Amino acid sequence: MKKITIAIDGFSSCGKSTMAKDLAREIGYIYIDSGAMYRAVTLYSIENGIFQNDRIDTEKLKNLIKDIHISFRLNPETGRPDTYLNGVNVENKIRTMEVSSCVSPIATLDFVREAMVTQQQEMGKAKGIVMDGRDIGTTVFPDAELKIFVTATPEIRAQRRYDELKAKGEEASFDEILENVKQRDYIDQNREVSPLRKASDALLLDNSDLTISQQKEWLAEQFERVIKEKN
Ligand code: CDP
Ligand code: CDP
């Protein structure tokens, strides 16, 4: 059976990685969370004094970007890939509010995007990959056979993120999360390089009123349809 490339883009916290991970596991494809890569660069920038007091030392980051190695390894306990930054598991560290509030400015930098896109294209060169992010269907894999663009209202997305943090036992403020979601949406849509937008050939999914299992079922149907057409 010929493998395909699946690109899942959309707004922050709308369920992209949940659906991408589940589908990849079911069909035996590789799953890559491209947002985790931008988050890892952000964590590196915070830890190395590149991102300080709302300022990014772009020259320093430009010089160090080649030293930032990001990889993914399956966590046997969760059955999902964890993110590694220069060999260290940073899966939990990259999900904090601090990283969430610094990541979008880092992701506007052209040399950061260039470095990430090159790595992402390398990861997907043999197809059989599900990648989620903001520019996967438009820039990383413009020829992907299946492209999905996911959206939901900001309030619903913030509520989902709030519930998720609460379930992990983390302190969270709904208002702070909603503000972060809106701010990232704005920066992601308005940056110069690869802004967040729906590829013309992407299928639009508004999952505001869908459960996780309903969206999973919808995605599986789209996959079945495309894979039949391609084989
Ligand atoms: O999961 P969540 O919606 O919180 O975001 P994410 O997928 O972890 O991505 C974090 C941030 O990285 C986004 O808000 C974007 O600023 C940036 N990003 C990007 O610019 N391009 C991508 N392909 C993926 C993420
Ligand atoms: O990857 P992205 O930032 O788009 O979102 P996610 O991390 O997959 O999902 C954010 C949260 O929303 C997770 O806690 C999901 O379980 C939850 N979710 C939901 O409650 N209902 C959906 N239809 C989709 C996701």
Image (cartoon, rainbow, N blue to C red):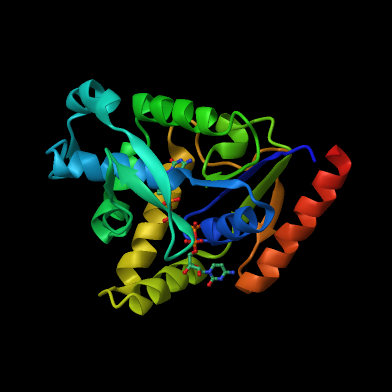
Residue under the point 63% across and 65% down: 207
Judge whether residue 7 can be spotted in this image: yes
Give the left or right position of residue 72, taking residue 29 as reference: left
Residue under the point 38% across and 66% down: 178
Judge whether residue 209 can be spotted in this image: no
Quarter of the figure that contains the C terminus:
top right
Residue under the point 60% across and 34% down: 138
Among the 4 quarters of the image, the one containing residue 53: top left
Instruction: List x then y, in percent, for residue 32.
Output: 51, 45
Give the left or right position of residue 10, taking residue 27 as reference: left
Give the left or right position of residue 196, taking residue 130 as reference: left
For the image, the number of numbered tags is 0
Residue under the point 62% across and 53% down: 24
Residue nearest the viewer, comparing 162 with 82 = 82
Quarter of the figure that contains the N terminus:
top right
Instruction: List x then y, in percent, for residue 163.
Output: 41, 76
Instruction: List x then y, in percent, for residue 116.
Output: 42, 31
Instruction: List x then y, in percent, for residue 169.
Output: 29, 78
Among the 4 quarters of the image, the one containing residue 58: top left
Residue that protrudes farthest toward the front in the picture: 76
119 w.r.t. 163: above or below: above
Residue nearest the viewer, comparing 80 with 13 = 80
